[in-house]
Amino acid sequence: MAGAVALRRSARRIVRPLATATALSRTLQQAERLLSSQASPEHGPRGVVSASDLGLYTPERIRNFSIIAHVDHGKSTLADRLLELTGTIQKGHGQPQYLDKLQVERERGITVKAQTATMFYRHTSASNGPDTPRYLLNLIDTPGHVDFSYEVSRSLAACQGALLVVDAAQGVQAQTIANFYLAFESNLSIIPVINKIDQPTADPDNVKDQLKRLFDIDPSEALLTSAKTGKGLEQVLPAVIERIPCPPGKCDSPVRMLLLDSYYDEYKGVICHVAVVDGALHKGDKIASAATGRAYEVQDVGIMHPELTPTGVLYTGQVGYVISGMRSTKEARIGDTLHQAKSTVEPLPGFKPAKHMVFSGLYPADGSDFEALSHAIEKLTCNDASVSVTKETSTALGMGFRCGFLGLLHMDVFHQRLEQEYGAQVISTIPTVPYIFEYGDGSKVQVENPAALASNPGKRVTTCWEPTVIATIIIPSEYVGPVIMLCSERRGEQLEYTFIDAQRALLKYRLPLKEIIVDFYNELKGITSGYATFDYEDSEYQQSDLVKMDILLNGQPVDAMATIVHNQKAQRIGKELVEKLKKFIDRQMFEITIQAAIGSKVIARETLSAMRKNVLAKCYGGDITRKKKLLEKQKEGKKRMKRVGSVDIPQEAFHELLKGSGSK
């Protein structure tokens, strides 16, 4: 307590001219944090979690669980209430959605990164008698959007159970179904939590029926809660302890850890989040990576309580962080097994590699900023391991990167984090998907960048394949007609059409991935007044009639604007693109011809007229041949300009093409 009081006093004594208001508030905040940590009832007068404290929690006293749900069903708010209930954070002192740390998460109101927090809880039950044992609970708050299901699957690997949160008013949604099966396939114990029961439109009995019909969950197992008001929360943690099994593991075996996640800190290097499966990890231990074989010394180890809290040790079944001096982003491989150096262990089953569904080129807005963009992308990919990055060069935009993402929202969030966290200004090309083309000689090539598909007259493309997805759409029954029409326009094949209850229908479609990556979700929300929920999982490739469409400016192809489209839609898409470009390209002193072409066949054209001087202004009457001579002279000059002039494509043109690149 004396340390915090001294900090407070020193803060109030800051009266020197150089001591700014920022320094004063930072010192006061530091004092408040120290005081609040000392107020923890679980770990002595100073609230410090020591190695001896962690040693009390054998695997039988540990529960690792995750919170999974559809977007905006109250996962992060429920996590806040559980943190307050266990004294991990003080009620009213933490910011709302405490575990949503990123600025992009706060602005959009969604969870992007899975976050871990360790809680300590005294469990009182009839079987305990007067003895109330303490439990160590590791909570993982996961994203709810379909693009971040890779984060969810990684989080579930560290858990033995999950809280399946369902909104009492909205009921089971598309991502609820997807997350349930992710947990079910991982053999986790699932506790259904019906949240937001305080809402006027809440119908918990109907939600229980849906859980029974869709997942065969006993309605009596569901917990009724309101994370906003706190109603029913007292039954959540006892249910976690009683229904979720303790983590398996051998305390006396050599240490084995699963690398769950990593992020980069400018001062500490790479911080790894790990789940200790066997043995114990101490500060100063030598560990090695099963994937790379490199050895490291453990510089710091601890738990997230909810911030990084050093403990000096992690025991079997516990989830925490390790700082081992990794400096390269390539060293921390997600799903890797870390083990005791100079010992041989059986690697743990890792994760399925992230399957990239959308590819886009990223280029610096100013060509001289390439190195800064490269550095920013390298740092950010350590925090987001599901992005693939390769260097590429464009004749129109210079040097840049071809990046693979899990979906369009994932790509959008990645761009926003680049701008907010690293100040990078980027131009992104039209998003595309990986296609497979087969030539007449039997050779096949996978194309992620349309510009790489060369128009080679010697090699004729005979067959094309495009990736498809199985889409699950849940909508109010009155919107079934417009949604079926939308899916038909997007070349969809209906697989299933059922009613969940009297008001809601479930549709399953096989759709080409290209048709949904840009604006499908926005259109779906628009025609259903925002009531539709949408989820998809990748399916196999299907044969399709595809062509490469080039955009030409004055006869020169712009490789960054090349795209692959379905042959039936090519003419309409080409017309839309050239019309948009005409609006955004500035007029020059020479005429600009904007064309969309498939091979040598031009399918759409717009002409941007030249800015020109009125050369006839000085002619007051006279012979017509004099005027014609002046106009012909001007025309020749414009032709010379056109030969040597270059057309600058503004950044807004790329952004406009990105918004609507022809999936309609």
Image (cartoon, rainbow, N blue to C red):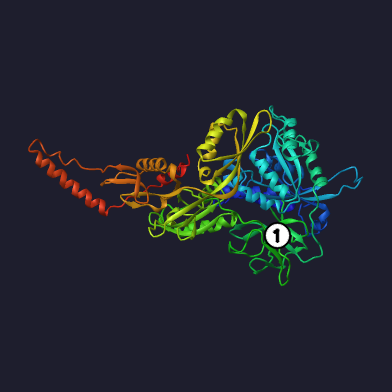
The image shows a total of numbered marks equal to 1
Task: Say whether residue 604 is left or right of residue 630.
Answer: right
Q: Who is closer to the viewer here, 556 or 297?
A: 556
> Residue 460: which quarter of the image?
bottom left
| Amino acid type assigned to the residue bearing label 1 in the image | Pro
Residue at 15% across, 38% down: 617
Task: Estimate the x, y position of residue 210 in percent, counting from the top left.
Answer: 72, 35
Task: Estimate the x, y position of residue 63 in percent, counting from the top left.
Answer: 78, 50
Q: Is residue 268 above or below residue 34?
A: below
Task: Estimate the x, y position of residue 490 in percent, counting from the top left.
Answer: 51, 40
Task: Say whether residue 9 is left or right of residue 522.
Answer: right
Res. 581 visible in picture:
yes
The residue most toward the bottom is 342
Q: Who is closer to the viewer here, 361 or 51?
A: 361
Task: Estimate the x, y position of residue 378 in percent, counting from the top left.
Answer: 54, 59
Residue at 60% across, 32% down: 531
> Residue 84: which quarter of the image?
top right
Q: Who is closer to the viewer here, 48 or 349?
A: 349
Res. 35 visible in picture:
no
Q: Residues within 10 Å of mark 1 (few under 14, many from 20)?
A: few
Q: Name the secondary structure under disc 1.
A: loop
The residue most toward the left is 622
Task: Say whether residue 256 is left or right of residue 606.
Answer: right
Task: Say whether residue 538 is left or right of residue 637.
Answer: right
Residue under numbered circle 1: 349
Q: Is residue 7 above or below residue 569?
A: below
